[in-house]
Amino acid sequence: HTQDYTTSAFFNLQTVKSINQSIMRIAASILAMAATASAFAPMPIVSRSTTLSGLPEEISDAIAENQAKSERWCEIRLLSDEDAEAQLSGEELESFKAYHADNKADIVKMKGVTELMLKSLELPKIQPKGKKQRKRDKFVLQTKIAAARTAEAAAK
C-alpha cells in the first residue's frame, strides 16, 4: 500500500506543477495581449485650436489673395485639357498646362519603372539540360581541350 500511496502522491505533485505552469502561461499570454492592444490605441487629443485650419483670425491682404488663388486652383486643377482650353486664359492656362505636362511626364516615367520592376520579378525560366545534352556539352569541351593540347604540342 505504501508504494501506491507514494506514487499517487508523486503523480498528484506532477499534476499540480503542470496545472500551475499552464495557468502561468495563460496569464502571461493574456497580459501580453493586453499590452499589445494598448500599444495600438490612438493618442488622445490634448488641445484643440480655436482658429480654423491654423489661419489667424484677422486675415491680411496677402493671405486672402493666396487663399483665393488656392480655391481657384482647386476648381481648375481637375479640368480636362479641352475644358481648360475653353475656360482658361493667360497665367491660369499656362500654369494648368505646366502642371499637367509635369504630371504626364511623371506618369510615363513611373510606367517605365513599373515595367522594369515587373521584368525583374518575372525571371525567365530556363529549362534544365537533359542527360544527352550534358553529354554533348562534355564531348565538345573535351574535343576543344584536346585540340588546344595538340596545337600546344605542335608549337613546341
Image (cartoon, grey):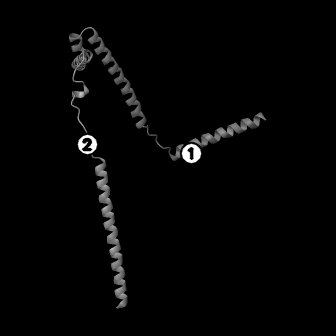
- Residue at which label 2 appears: 44
Indicate the quadrant containing the C terminus: top left, top right, bottom left or bottom right: top right
Q: Quadrant of residue 10?
A: bottom left
Residue 120 tag number:
none
Position of 49 with respect to 102 (left or right) is left
> What SS does tag 1 mark?
helix
Residue at horizontal 37 percent and vertical 27 percent from the top: 110
Amino acid type, residue under disc 2 in the picture: Pro
Q: Quadrant of residue 89?
A: top left
Q: Is residue 40 visible?
A: yes
Residue 135 tag number:
1
- Rendering coords of residue 92 (x, y %): 26, 12
Q: Residue furthest front?
A: 58
Position of 81 with respect to 150 (left or right) is left
Q: Residue furthest top?
A: 90
In depth, the one of 31 and 95 nearer the eye is 31
Amino acid type, residue under disc 1 in the picture: Lys
Q: Quadrant of residue 115?
A: top left
Residue at horizontal 31 percent and vertical 53 percent from the top: 35
Q: Residues within 10 Å of mark 1 (few under 14, many from 20)?
A: few
Residue at horizontal 33 percent and vertical 61 percent from the top: 28
Q: Residue furthest right?
A: 156
Question: Are the two marked residues, 1 and 2, in contact with CB atoms closer than 8 angstroms?
Answer: no
Q: Residues within 10 Å of mark 2 (few under 14, many from 20)?
A: few
Indicate the quadrant containing the N terminus: top left, top right, bottom left or bottom right: bottom left
Where is 98 relative to 123, above or below?
Answer: above
Mark 1 and mark 2 lie on one chain; the one further toward the N terminus is 2
> What SS does tag 2 mark?
loop
